[in-house]
């Protein structure tokens, strides 16, 4: 197996995630696109770990997984708060601080 | 060697199609289910690379917990599930141009740098090696990430409770 095939897959997933973050209007969908980007990073880390025949890639991927879980928990709590205050979870409706 | 590449191609194609589905489908629940396919494909790639432990952690944590949280979020915010409503904003073409630009740069750099580099797998990495690394070399980062998780949990409870 070539190293590049995993890295290119990761790059594709990351760019798809960026597209989703920029174009989606619903807050939960934006969080999902961020998860897509984190999964792409995990693919890269594990591929480099396998390339060097070491466990370090796996350890870093586990840390990234933990951070992703924490981020989703806090993010969804914030989404619920936005929904409760403005009765909509669309990012376009969150403009209370606009000048 | 050939079988590995065929498996990689099939899984990578499924992941790529599902990733495009996550960012383009009009049904919010379908987006979550496409995300399940992407993450399961990632776990399959990890097994293909001989890194078994992180593959099963990905299945348990991402598919078991994070996707369920997403579904809770979708249900609790009454996300639109009717295909006639648009879920995107008017940034579609600039965003597509930007992400294609980034994909082009990343792809060119990766092909230029790692052209022809092969992954030589000796044997699958055993879980005991991973746990030795976590609980010896990376013990302090492990504890820090545990405290971070606790802080995130308490923060989520404080933010979401109504009073």
Image (tube, rainbow, N blue to C red):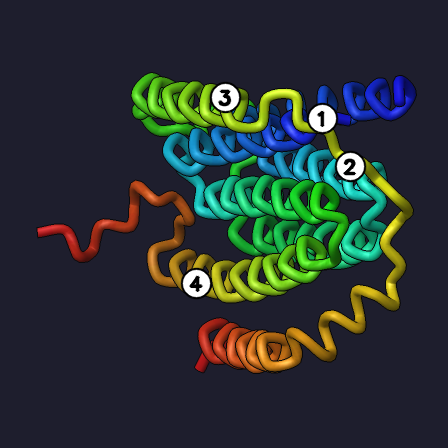
Above or below, comparing residue B55 to residue B4 in the picture: below
Q: Nearer the viewer, residue B29 or A67?
A: A67
Taking the spot 42% from the left edge, 62% from the top edge, the residue there is A84
Measure the C-alpha gap from mark 2 to mark 1.
13 Å
Query: Mark 4: few, some, or many residues within 10 Å (few <14, many ≥20)?
Result: some
Labels 4, 2: front one:
2
Give the mark, 2 or 3, whose residue is nearer the N terminus. Answer: 2
Is residue B157 at least partly visible in the picture? no
Closer to the camera in the image, B23 or B101: B101
SS at badge 2: helix
Give how far across and how far down residue A57 sits, in percent: 67, 53
Asked if the residues shown at circle 2 and circle 1 are in contact, with their CB atoms under 8 angstroms apart, the answer is no
Residue B63 x %, y %: 75, 50
Task: Tell me if I can see residue A17 in this picture.
Answer: yes
Residue neighbourhood size for the residue with mark 3, other residues' Cα within 10 Å, grouped as few (<14), some (14–19), many (≥20): few
Q: CA distance from mark 1 to mark 4?
A: 42 Å
- Tell us which disc is closer to us: 2 or 3: 3
**Residue depth check, mark 2 versus mark 1: number of the one nearer the observer:** 1
Q: Is there one chain holding both mark 2 and mark 1?
A: no
Residue at mark 4: A78
Instruction: Label 4: state its secondary structure.
Output: helix
Q: Which mark is residue A2?
A: 1
Q: Nearer the viewer, mark 3 or mark 4?
A: 3
Q: Nearer the viewer, residue B4 or B28?
A: B4
Q: Is residue B129 left or right of residue B82?
A: right
Sequence-wise first label, 1 or 4: 1
Discs 3, 4: same chain: no
Q: Which mark is residue B45?
A: 2
| Residue B112 circle label | 3
């Amino acid at each position: 197996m070539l190293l590049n095939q995993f890295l290119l897959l990761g790059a594709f997933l990351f760019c798809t995630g960026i597209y989703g973050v920029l174009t989606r209007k619903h807050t939960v969908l934006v969080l999902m696109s961020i998860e897509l980007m984190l999964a792409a990073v995990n693919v890269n880390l594990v591929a480099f770990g396998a390339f060097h025949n070491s466990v370090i890639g796996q350890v870093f991927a586990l840390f990234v997984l933990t951070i992703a879980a924490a981020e989703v928990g806090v993010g969804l709590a914030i989404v619920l708060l936005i929904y409760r205050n403005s009765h909509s979870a669309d990012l376009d409706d969150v403009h209370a601080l606009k000048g | 060697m050939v079988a590995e590449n065929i498996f990689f191609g099939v899984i990578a194609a499924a992941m790529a199609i599902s990733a495009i589905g996550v960012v383009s489908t009009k049904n919010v629940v379908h987006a979550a289910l496409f995300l399940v396919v992407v993450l399961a494909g990632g776990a399959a790639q990890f097994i293909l690379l001989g890194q078994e432990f992180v593959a099963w952690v990905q299945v348990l944590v991402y598919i078991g917990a994070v996707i369920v949280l997403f579904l809770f979020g979708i249900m609790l915010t009454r996300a639109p599930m009717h295909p006639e409503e648009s879920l995107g904003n008017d940034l579609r073409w600039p965003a597509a141009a930007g992400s294609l630009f980034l994909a082009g740069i990343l792809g060119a750099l990766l092909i230029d740098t790692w052209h022809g580099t092969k992954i030589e797998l000796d044997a699958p990495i055993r879980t005991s090696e991973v746990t030795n690394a976590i609980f010896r070399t990376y013990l302090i980062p492990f504890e820090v990430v545990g405290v971070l998780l606790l802080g995130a949990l308490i923060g989520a409870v404080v933010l979401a409770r109504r009073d």
